[in-house]
Amino acid sequence: MTLHPESLATAAFAVSLALTAALTAMGAFLKGQPGLRKWILALWLACAGTVLLALRGSVPEAIPVLGGHLMLSLSAAMTWVGMAEFCGRPVEVRRALELSAIYIGVHAFFLLVHPSLGIRSINYILMSTAWNLAIAWMLLRHGPKELTGSSRLVAGLFLADTLFNAGVLLVRATHPLAANTNWLGSLEVAQYLEGLVAGTLETLGLAILLSHRLFAQLQQAARSDGLTGILNRRTLDEEAARLLEICQRQGLPCAVLMADVDHFKHFNDAHGHLAGDEALRHLAKLIGPELRKTDLFGRYGGEEFTLFLPGSQGPQALAVADRFRALVASRPVTWVGAELPLTISVGVAAYGGAGPVELMLLYTEADKALYLAKERGRNRVELTPD
């Protein structure tokens, strides 16, 4: 069976159109996802470029060639812009448009002023290679940490496309293809086949990135408290039980801190529940950055927060708790232009690392210490015996 470039171009367009329609439908349901709108635009530009190039021979050549390649260049540029947006990097649309203008200017020169199909082919390969490298670099260097696996996979797809283009460029530079029509036709068929496969895989790769991010967001939502963004009670209990088991197995100490906002009901009554919500967010933002990577910090319910400190003995945990208490007391919450004072009381329960202990027992002891701190005047820290 003989493969013809025209047949492959038709197949490539059909597949591209189907994938574009699918991603567009996805975009209708996933509004607000970074990069998605730019990628959809890129795919439609690629479809438009394919249609224009298919008109060669029916209209003056400058229209389909320059128009088609402009669309393809803009498609690659928008894919890169979308990737920058997806990775949370500055979106430089103007630079992308300037590079596309340079590309089409070179193409126009070697079509209208000094006609050369070979140089135009090299120009296209260089353009495609440059954007593929830029996209792969963006993913490998700035891809979201929670999406490392899918970022590497998709970067690999663009790099594979780059390697093929580099091979084509090397062949064109070292072989007089114009003198061998069969050779040239075979290379063209290979390029169409690779373009069909690469375009399909890269589009699916974009869908994989979106799906992975959505899954990560769902996981984060399931683990996090909706108001403060820190761990919710269920996740806190699960992770703390896991760490406590490790501490017991290795004979390591640990501590549980229970913190409660002082007079929170009065705070809400005086300033409103929205101010109370802001106070809880404020507290979470103050304490979160001060923790070690191994520490757990979550909202246990209402205005009560819990910290689990693996490896910390009683005196160390007491010092940490007092540091957090002082930090909150020194940083009032800002609400409607006013600075509202906020204090917390903290109860600390410590486990020395010897013998079995239940997490709920540590919670209970820390809660008793918390009530003791409130009875003794609030804005203070109390430690239960080890």
Image (tube, helix red, strand yellow):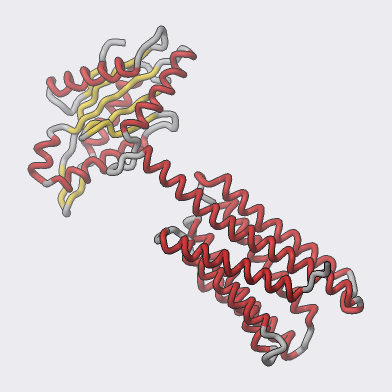
User: Residue at point 24% right, 22% down?
Assistant: 347
Along the viewing direction, whichever of 139 and 212 lies nearer the viewer: 212
Q: Quadrant of residue 342?
A: top left
Looking at the picture, does residue 128 appear above or below residue 332? below
User: Residue at point 9% right, 37% down?
Assistant: 266
Looking at the picture, does residue 264 appear above or below residue 103? above
The C terminus lies in which quarter of the figure? top left
* Residue 298: x %, y % from top left: 32, 33
Residue 292 is at least partly visible in this image: yes
* Residue 44: x %, y % from top left: 55, 72
User: Residue at point 35% right, 30% down?
Assistant: 236
* Residue 279: x %, y % from top left: 21, 42
* Residue 116: x %, y % from top left: 79, 83
Looking at the picture, does residue 55 appear above or below residue 149? below
Q: Residue furthest front?
A: 1
Q: Residue furthest top?
A: 355
- The answer to whether 147 appears left or right of 9 in the picture is left
Count the numbered circles shown.
0
- The answer to whether 150 appears left or right of 32 in the picture is right
Looking at the picture, does residue 380 appear above or below residue 61? above
Residue 99 is at least partly visible in this image: no
Along the viewing direction, whichever of 156 and 140 lies nearer the viewer: 156
Q: Quadrant of residue 139?
A: bottom right
The N terminus lies in which quarter of the figure? bottom right
- The answer to whether 245 appears left or right of 224 in the picture is right
Q: Quadrant of residue 355?
A: top left
